[in-house]
Amino acid sequence: MAVTEPKGHGQHAGMWVFPDAAVMTQDVGEKTKAMPRPFTTALAVTGIFFILGIVGFIARAVDDGFDDIAPWGYYMAIFSMVFMVTSGAPLVALAFRFTKSHWRRPLSRVAELFSIVGILNLLMFIPLMFLLPGIANPDAVIEGELAVRRTIWFEGPIGAPHAWDLVGVAFLTITSLTILWISAKPDMAECRDTATGFRRWLYNYLAGNWYGTKRQWNAQKAGLALLGAFYFMTLIFMHFVISSDYAQSLIPGWKDSIFPVIYTITSLQMSLGAILVVLFIMRRWGGYEGYIGKSTFWSASKVLLGVTLLWVYHLFAFFITFWYGRLEIEQNVIKYLVTDTYAIIFLLNLIFSFAAPFAVLLWNPVRRSAWGPALAGVLVLFGGLMFNIRIFVGSANAAPGAELYKAFMEHVPAPVYPDIWDVFMVVGGLGAAVFLYLAATKLMPLISIWEVKEGTLYQKWGKFIRGEYLILGKPE
Amino acid sequence: MQEGTPLQSRQVNRELLVSILNSPKWFFGALSVLGFIVLVAMSTAGFMINQGFGVTGLNRPVMWGFFITNFVFWIGISHAGVMLSAILRLSKAEWRRPATRAAEILTVFSLMTAMTMPLIHTGRPWRTVYWIYTLPFVPYDYARGIWPNIRTPLVWDPSAVYTYLTSSILFVMIALIPDFAVLRDRTTGISHRIYGMLAMGWQGNARQWKLQIIAGVLLSALILPVFVSVHSIVSWDFGMAVSVKSWHSTIFAPYFVVGAVHSGVSAVAFVLIILRYIYGWQNYIRHEHIDALARLLIVVATGWFYFFVMEVVFGFYGREADEIAVRNYQFMISPWNIWMMIFVGLTYFAPVAIWLSRPARRNLWIMSLACIFVNIGMWLERFLIIVPGLARKQLLTFDWYTYRPSSVEWIIIIGTFALVSMLMLTIARVVPLIPLYDIKEGEILRTEIKIGRVTVPAVFRED
């Protein structure tokens, strides 16, 4: 494609790219169509993992059924892992669009495409709905037990928590898909004339009435803003619901108001990490280096550094309050999730969600590279996996049977290690998510063409005194 | 986002130094009135120390009342300085330029004022020395073998606050050096000498600018953890107390920090509006700046509201009798439930409704009102955390009590507001409350680009 040399000097060399708007649509369209060998290999490998996951799921269902949540801890963990990445990613696109950050333009679509993987969340959630124990104690209440276990739903409303959880996850998925559709409409309209086969049909179907009139652009902008606000609220609520219903309320005595916040922060951290990894792969092997300057990595990595620090700050706020209080009820929760039972997993969580990415992102030259932020992204994704295993395997196995209705956890349980079906489900869940994402990249342009084109209007390279610098248009 | 006309360097000097080089007629009058209120408050504090705590409304079990509420409030206001200055400097937000200095100075004065509150609250301020020292020449506690308990947040507090105060002063001073040099060159006599000393030989050469910028960036990055730690530690004064059920909440640290930023940024917006009005700085503090602050405040307020909801929901979540008693007191019993409604309305719903409207964000009267709402609300928030928690601290109802502040407490609290206003007014006579060099830099980097038939404001960016 016709693209200028990357601009920038000194420590900012190669920081900015100025793609040629005239050939962008055709170039991105061709890249969307292309099926290079490494891509098909990745698709095949992740497809095999996906099948392994289904095998693991069926085997677990045959072995243990859906009556008891305990054997499904690893399934819950992998559901949550995928949920955190896919639900957080569209918010990343929306947030940077809201703040009008120019550097976000190449990453918007990469982030929004995670919405398609959200369909997997919805499917994975259905069994979880049946696994969640009821709120009311099914047996006669004895001393030290509660008639209604602690949940955020208290004693109602009808259908809580199961039906409401499902409605929430479904709403989130539908909203994120709608956001993707509205955002990608101009690009699909532009590509529909050059696309062939299924893509042509799809683009015609989804963007049939788009002609790029001023009214349509205004409607698109307003639609994204309104849906964005709605999505943000739904996301925060659903993170609160999932982290409470499937984690906190399954551990008797764990009353921790900061946990939903930690969950949301971990989600944002992981989704930003995943986006950076995808951007790096696109730039390094996908032929998109003309669209993705290092400035995107640099700016996103600063946000990732901030989120990483927020993560450890919130974790510390939880830990110090419980630790200092010296209440047996809280000490047991700490022993279970932090210092004893899942100590090694916690340590890995801490290292990969905080210490390692912090050590990587602290350095300016690393943040200014493409590989540095992507490396940090891989680290936080692994850290996030450890977080989910620690929390969800822990919560599923904290109080088997009637113990769930006790006022607090009297004994600290032993850790639960994965069996072969758990390994299959974890690998399969991750494989399925990557498989779906890869497939989605062939459905829609991986670069938000209209946003990058808009960026070329607002960003120029100009002379200032004796040097040349970036000129950034600020229309409002 | 760049409104207004381009400004020349001479014009910037002339207009922004007006508060220092020319005293307006009202200046000494206003200073005298504020000074008188401060004097009355100091006398009242002296009276209280002489007479004992009996003259206040404090009584068991509510031993923390207006003074501690006010302490937390002023610590909160102090968070504006770093929020605006350090974070916006690091994120290179252009609209920060006129707001940073006033925010930083407000930080310093509100911290100083905050620290007077625990001292007054001790009833015998001289005995606070035992928090830190147990030396032979301070015999009382040493003789009894009583040692300061460094593990209590009450000891962490002064450490954190004084670290923040020191670093904030350093932060302000570093940023002031180029402006001191401008003042040095425009004054004579003793003023010239003092400004000369403060300017530390500033000539404005490339090396000095480079060092000043690096120092500013480094201090911005270093001060951020201090800023977060201060209000976290203040929150842990409450959060670590397991005996007061509604206080022992893991979310308190970020909840307090976000609340502090909310009240602090609102206070800065209000101060900027006043400065614009009294010194005629319409060219510098423009509607776009207040608008940007308001948009930032929508995000901060929403974050705060989320933490508030989490705090309340998890208060009920445990369904423990003693915590339910506190929540019942807060939400169901008059007048606390009315205060609670006023607090939530003033802190979130009313101001956010205002800020969502662009014309309202650009109307300075309405913005002032919104900022005052937030600060009244945030003051009430601290009050409603502290008092109901203590009033229902005990499980047995015969130990329950309430709190009604006395006139002594009212006067001292009003005095702290007068003190901060007086200090801000005084400092406006000594240093420019809008950084000259920052404004000039913004003007230099300002440019335009043409998009089709439209010319759009733009800025040069090195990174």
Image (cartoon, coloured by chain):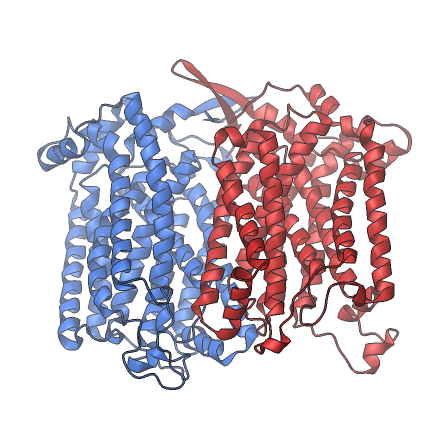
Name the residue at 40% across, 82% down. Answer: A412
Where is B273 relative to B413, above or below? Answer: above
Q: Residue farthest to the top?
A: B453
Is residue A115 shown left or right of residue A56? Answer: right
The image position of residue A423, as x and y in percent, is: 23, 69
Foreground pick, A91 / B215: A91
The image position of residue A77, as x and y in percent, is: 30, 65
The answer to whether one can see residue B222 in this image is: no
Name the residue at 50% across, 41% down. Answer: B352
Name the residue at 28% across, 26% down. Answer: A216
Where is A342 relative to A45, above or below? Answer: below
How many callouts does the rendering have? 0
Foreground pick, A19 / B188: B188
The image position of residue A159, as x and y in percent, is: 26, 63
Chain A colour?
A: blue
Q: Residue farthest to the left?
A: A197
Where is B436 relative to A84, above or below? Answer: above
Where is A209 relative to B238, above or below? Answer: above
Q: Residue farthest to the right?
A: B189
Question: Image quadrant of residue B366?
Answer: top right
Is residue B300 shown left or right of residue B368? Answer: left
Question: Image quadrant of residue A179?
Answer: top left
The answer to whether one can see residue A322 in this image is: yes
Foreground pick, A264 / B11: A264
The image position of residue B154, as x and y in percent, is: 68, 67
According to the colouring, which chain is red? B
Name the residue at 31% across, 51% down. Answer: A87
Q: Residue farthest to the front?
A: B334
Q: Image quadrant for the N terminus of chain A?
A: top left
Foreground pick, B55 / A439: B55
